[in-house]
Amino acid sequence: MPSIENEMRFCIFNPRGGPVTIRLEANNALRAVGKFALFDAGNQPREQWPMKAGDTGSADFTIQTRPQSLKRMVMTWAVLCCSMLPAVDRGIVSIQILQDGAPCPLTKSALWVLTDIANCQQSAKKKRIRNALTFLSE
Amino acid sequence: MFSRFAFAKENLSILFPIFLLAPSLLAQTPEPAYKYILDYDVPESPALVALGVTPAKVLRGSAAKPVVLNLLNQVGFAKRVQNGVAVDFSPYFTFGGRLRSIEEYRTDGWKRLAANSQLSIATIQSEEETNALLFGLGLRTTLFDSHDLLQDKELGEDIDEILLGSLEAPQPGETGDVDEVEVDVTPAYEKAKKRLLKKTGSALAVGYGASGRLKSSIANTDSIDNVKHTAWLSFKYSFGGGTDFLSIYQGQYATPSHPEHRFGIAIRKSGTTLNVAGEIVYTSRTKRFEMGANLEVRLLNRIGAVVSLSSEQPSTTNRSLTKMKLNTIIRWNLSQ
C-alpha cells in the first residue's frame, strides 16, 4: 500500500481563470519565511520568489506565469519557522493556492501542525518544510 | 537563597562601599550592558512581594518572564534558618492561551495584558514557629513596557532576512517534508537590544498578593491566620544607557481600617553581569524613611543572585531602633 506521506500533491486550477496567488500562513506568532519556485514540465525554473508571513502571520504572492501555461508545472517550496514567544512551541503553517479569490482544491493538504518549535532567540534549530505540488487544469 | 539578619544602625555605612564599588565593577564587564538588562531583567516574584521578602522594596515594572523559579533560604545570623521556594509562571500560555500573530499581540490590548501576566506561589518557613509555614500568592501584570521586544518591528524583519538568506527553493525531486536545520538569528536580537538600550521609555505594572500563615503546616481554613493583602503599582523609566528610575506605591491591608502605605523611589544602573540599585521608601506605619541598596549578579546563563541591604524600623514604639536587613535570593529564569 502506498504511503499517504509520499503521495503527490496536485492543485486543480482553472486555465481560463484569473491570476494564481500563493498564500503562506503561520499562526501562534510564529516567524515563518519561505522560498518558492515554479518549474516547467521539463524541470526548468520559470519563477522564483521569497515570502514572509511577517507580523500578521500571512502573506500573498501572485505568480507571473499565466494560468494558461501552468498545466503540469511544479511549484516547490522551502519554509523555515521559529517561535517568537518563549512560551509557545507549537503552531500551524499552511500554503494555499488562490484563484479569483477562492482556494484551489488540493489533492493533499498543504498544512503542517508543528510541535517542538524552537524559540527564535534561544536555539539555532529551525523547523524546515520542503515540499511541492503539481498544477493540473480542471 | 534568602537570608536576613539584624544590624546595628551604625552599619548603614556598609551601603556606601556598594555604591563606591559599583562603577568599577560595571566598568570591568566586557560584554555590552544590554545583554544583561534584557536577558535578566526578571521582575520580582509577586508571591514574595505578598510575603514582604523581596530583596528590593521598589519593584521594577518590566515585562513578565514565562517561568521563573526562586530558591530561598535564610542563612541566619540573629534568627534560625528559613527555607522556601517561589514559582512564577505566565498563566495565559501555561493554560493553553494562544496568539494568532505578533500583530494580534500588538493590537489586542487584552491578549497583550494576559500574555504579560505573571502568577506566583511561594512558601517559606516561619521565623517564629518551627511547625508553621508562610505562604504567598500573587498576580502581577505589565500594563505597558516600551522595551518589549515583541513591539520591535525591526527585530521581526531582521529575523526574516536571516532566515531567507539561508534558504533555497528545492528542485522538484529534492523535496522531503519536515526536518530541522540550524540557522542562527542571534545578530537580529543583538541589533534589537542595542536599539532598546539607547531608547528612553517607561513601563508600568500592577500587582496583588495575599499571604498568610499555615499553622502546623496543614492547609485547611482553620489553620490559616495572619492573612494580609498587598496591592502595588510600579513604574519604571529608562533614561537609556542602562540607567533606570523606579517608583512604587504599595498598600498592605492586614486590617481594612489600618492599611499600611509605602511610597518608594530608586535609581538602578545595569551592567552585563551586575545591576546596582539604591532606594528610599516612606512607610506610613512608622512615618519614617527607610533606605536600601541591592545588587543583582549574573552567575550563570539564566541564573542570577540578588543581594540587598535595607534599613527597617520594626516597631512604632521604639523609633530609635533601626535594623538592617540583608537578603539574598537565587533566581532561575527557566523560560529561556
Image (tube, rainbow, N blue to C red):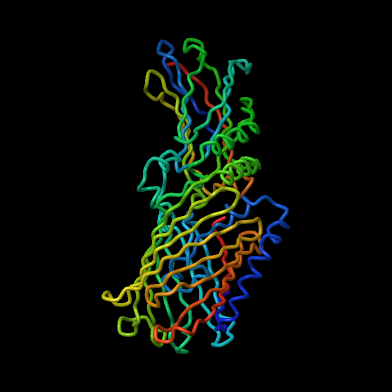
In this view of the protein, which residue sits in the foreground, B288 or B307?
B288
Residue at x-position 59% and y-position 70%: B307
Nearest the camera: A15 or B164?
A: B164
Residue A31 rendering spot, x and y as whole percentages: 52, 39
* Residue at point 61%, 27% (across, down): B169
Quadrant, the C terminus of chain A: top left
Please report the residue visible at 50 percent of the width from the left and 28 percent of the height from the top.
A9
Q: Above or below — where is A15 with respect to B226?
A: above
Q: Which residue lies most toward the front here?
A: B320
Taking the image as drawn, is residue A1 in sight?
no
Q: Nearer the viewer, residue B41 or B97?
A: B41
Could you tell me how many numbered marks the image carries? 0
Q: Measured along the vertical axis of the image, is residue A129 above or below residue B246?
A: above
Q: Position of residue B314 (x, y in %)?
A: 45, 82
In the image, residue B106 lies at what x, y percent? 42, 41
The location of residue A67, given as percent across then percent down, is: 47, 13
